[in-house]
Image (cartoon, rainbow, N blue to C red):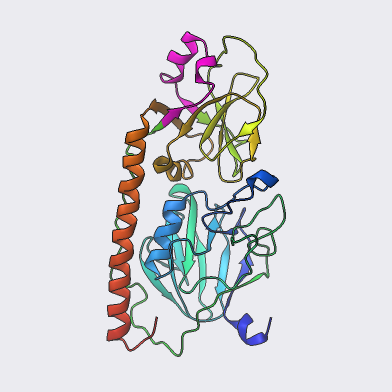
Amino acid sequence: MEGGCLQMSIQVIRAGIMDSLQDKGRFGFQQLGINPSGAMDLYSMEIANLLTGNAPDETVIEMHFPAPVLLFRSTALIALSGADFTAILNDEPIPLHQPVWVKKDDVLAFRSPRKGARLYMSVAGGFAIDQWLGSGSTNLVAAAGGFKGRTFAAADEIPFRKKWNDIQESKRVLPWKAGLDWGNESDKFSILLGKEWDWLTDSSKEQFFNQSYQLSTQSDRMGYRLEHPLLELKYQEELISSAVNRGTLQLLPNGKIILLMADHQTTGGYPRLGHVVSAHQHLLAQYRPGDSIYFRQVNQETAEQWIIRQQQHLLQLQNACTFRLQQYFHENNHQL
């Protein structure tokens, strides 16, 4: 990498916990045992991208708390979406869900986690990284993709593509904001029943929808281990390893559930009790160990209507952001 390109970068002054580059994920290779990875909260990832004029599936930085301290080597247009970690730029607060100008030598840090578990940062133009198997997502198991196949470390230089020439802005925060359509206003997550649902005893079926499930401290990007009163099967039957996906609820031999997330394995040999609908999966990404959730049953038609509604909302947001950015850059004689 040439020195000029390196200057268009973000330097990690202090690494956080599990900071990595992620996009929508890597698909088409699960038969080879390569899991999809990708952002845990795809909805927030897309919102951050749209606010800076990127394609919705452009690679972003996924952060947890404690979050990193980042030094910008050159001017950039960024947006933050997802969790609220009390972002500060040069010790001044900046908002979520709005485009923000960051200038050369600015320092971005995060004070405290107010709400949520994962925060996403996009940079206009995207990050200058090589894709692996068609994706910029970091696969930690394979040590490939993203930035050198790993999470960030102090002194890393994360390059980005877009160069801005001598932009002088009086306002850091651009005057429009994304309206969020979360699609779920409670701790109840809708599921489609899984293939092995009927393996549960009748009492466990009733219990399933009437009890809470607490995220254990063993929860991570691979899956959430849930704490709850034990569920029982009618009989113990050997299950041939079968395909699993993000959102699959597997019943472990100890009677407890694991909810598979972005870094899930490609196959599993445990009974699949259900699948969290796609439209609610991004919300799960914002839950932390100790938080409790509930499940409710929904039919396929309703689940499809929800995901269509969500995609319509994102398309409307994309059109609005494109218009506002083009108008802004035209009025200020900049080129996007």
On the question of residue 186 being in view, the answer is no
x%, y% of residue 239?
65, 22
Q: Quadrant of the N terminus?
A: bottom right
In this view, 329 is above or below 15: below
Between 107 and 286, the one lying in front of the other is 286
Up the image or down, 124 lies above or below 272; here it is below
Number of marks drawn: 0
Say whether residue 210 is magenta: yes
Q: Is residue 150 magenta?
A: no
Q: What is the quadrant of the C terminus in the image?
A: bottom left
Task: Between residue 230 and residue 317, name the one nearer to us.
Answer: 317
Q: Is residue 286 left or right of residue 314?
A: right
| Residue 149, image quadrant | bottom right
Which corner quadrant of the image does residue 98 belong to?
bottom left
Examine the rendered structure and indicate whether residue 300 appears above or below residue 203.
below
Q: Residue at x 63, y 24 (%)?
A: 252
Residue 109 location in percent, x, y? 52, 64
Q: Residue at x 66, y 28 (%)?
A: 269
Q: Residue at x 35, y 40 (%)?
A: 304
Residue 45 image offset from top left, x and y in percent: 46, 57
- Image vertical order of residue 225 relative to residue 62, above or below: above
x, y percent for residue 83:
44, 52
Segment tinted magenta in the rendering = 191-213
Depth check: 172 or 203 in front? 203
